[in-house]
């Protein structure tokens, strides 16, 4: 069964280009030009990964990302922001908001495919580790890493980490 990727992009030519490249690589794709249609589809069918534009009509991509991360059924889905916002502060804001990766337009298709494959590999490893690890907590000196809850505590105090930061730990 092929993996499914949702593309949330209001520019039809970019959405079609991304979809064509992904389908050529064996992925299933579904494209959306706005967040309303995207969330309607998410209610019944979850993808393996989401490509999300920031500058969308209506609800912008960062608000969409915030909703994804705050919805338990969606919160663990890998999200790559694909955007024309090229500033370093924009990338930092996107990653700090919970994106797993950030690609600026114009982008190379090989780079896009490599980042998608890398994020899907990380997701598979994360799922494998959670399923196979009998011990949910790892300890090192004053550090406690709870792999089931995906939390980190140092000296008994919770440390707030984004999904990306936790994955690095």
Image: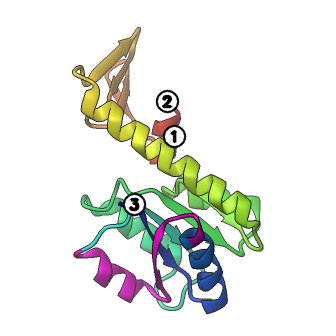
Q: Which residues are magenta?
A: 24-44
Q: Is residue 90 left or right of residue 57?
A: right
- Residue 54 visible in image: no
Where residue 67 sits: x, y (%)?
A: 36, 69
Q: Is residue 20 left or right of residue 149?
A: right
Secondary-structure class at tag 3: loop
Please state which of residues 87 and 84 is positioned toward the viewer in this rendering.
84
* Residue 48 marker: 3
Which of labels 2 and 3 is toward the front?
A: 3
Please state which of residues 11 and 86 is positioned toward the viewer in this rendering.
11
View extreme (top): residue? 141
Where residue 130 sits: x, y (%)?
A: 29, 34
Q: In which quadrant of the rendered view does residue 69 lie?
A: bottom left
For label 1, the crowd category at 10 Å Cα-Cα, with few meaning under 14, some 14 to 19 and many 20 or more, is: few
Q: Is residue 164 left or right of residue 158?
A: right
Question: How far is the residue under mark 1 from the one under mark 2?
Answer: 7 Å
Task: Specify whether residue 30 is painted magenta.
Answer: yes
Which of labels 3 and 1 is toward the front?
A: 3
Residue indicated by mark 1:
165
For label 3, the crowd category at 10 Å Cα-Cα, with few meaning under 14, some 14 to 19 and many 20 or more, is: some
Labelled pair 1, 2 in contact (Cβ < 8 Å): yes
Earlier in the chain: of badge 3 and badge 1, it is: 3
Residue indicated by mark 2:
169
Secondary-structure class at tag 1: helix
Residue drawn 49% across the image and 44% down it: 121
Where residue 128 sits: x, y (%)?
A: 34, 35
- Residue 123 visible in image: yes
Residue drawn 38% across the image and 81% down it: 38
């Amino acid at each position: 069964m092929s993996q499914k990727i949702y593309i949330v992009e209001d520019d039809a030519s970019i959405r079609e280009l991304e979809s064509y490249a992904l389908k050529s690589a064996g992925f299933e794709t579904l494209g959306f030009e706005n967040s309303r249609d995207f969330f309607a589809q998410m209610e019944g069918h979850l993808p393996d990964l989401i490509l999300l534009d920031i500058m969308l009509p209506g609800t912008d991509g960062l608000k969409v990302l915030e909703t994804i991360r705050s919805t338990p059924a969606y919160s663990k889905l890998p999200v790559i922001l694909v955007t024309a916002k090229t500033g370093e502060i924009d990338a930092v804001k996107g990653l700090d908001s919970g994106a797993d990766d950030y690609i600026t337009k114009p982008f190379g298709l090989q780079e896009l495919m490599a980042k998608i494959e890398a994020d899907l590999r990380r997701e598979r490893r994360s799922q494998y580790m959670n399923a196979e690890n009998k011990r949910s907590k790892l300890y090192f000196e004053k550090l406690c890493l709870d792999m089931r809850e995906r939390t980190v505590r140092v000296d008994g105090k919770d440390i707030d980490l984004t999904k990306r930061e936790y994955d690095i730990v």
